[in-house]
Image: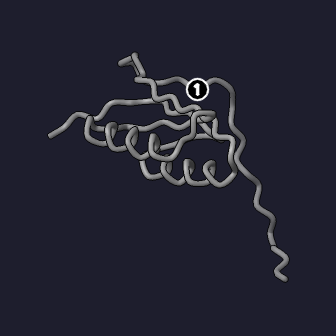
Amino acid sequence: MSTRRLYIAAYDVRSPKRLARALNILRDYATGGQKSVFECFLTPAEHRELCRRIQGLLSDKDRFFILPHGSRRKPRALGRGRIAKEPDYFYLK
């Protein structure tokens, strides 16, 4: 069984069409993320596949980074999240 490793993947894509395609590719591998930065727990085979798929998409003006997370410690989050307040009703048109 292959061991998964945590990677941080980020991209900067100039074309809106390629940007949407890059987002869809990253969502196939990501466990979480925000805007254009994602956490991906990947096996070596998944890492190669992700890089191959992204490489086929990008132009020479775009950028893609995938960095292994070097720490074996559990990630820490700073700050305090708020629970979203849902209204008691919704308007439907």
Query: Is 68 above or below relative to 21?
Result: above
Residue positioned most to the bottom:
93
Q: Which quadrant holds the C terminus? A: bottom right
Kindly identify the residue that appears in the image at 76 percent across and 61 percent down. 86
Label count reads 1
Q: Position of residue 32 (x, y in %)?
A: 52, 42
Name which residue type carries label 1.
Ala
Residue positioned most to the front:
60
Disc 1 designates what residue? 77
Kindly identify the residue that appears in the image at 19 percent across and 37 percent down. 2
Query: Is 19 above or below relative to 59?
Result: below
**Quarter of the view holding residue 49:** top left
Kindly identify the residue that appears in the image at 34 percent across and 37 percent down. 47
In this rendering, would 36 be left or right of 46?
right
Q: Position of residue 66 (x, y in %)?
A: 46, 29
In this rendering, would 88 be left or right of 53?
right
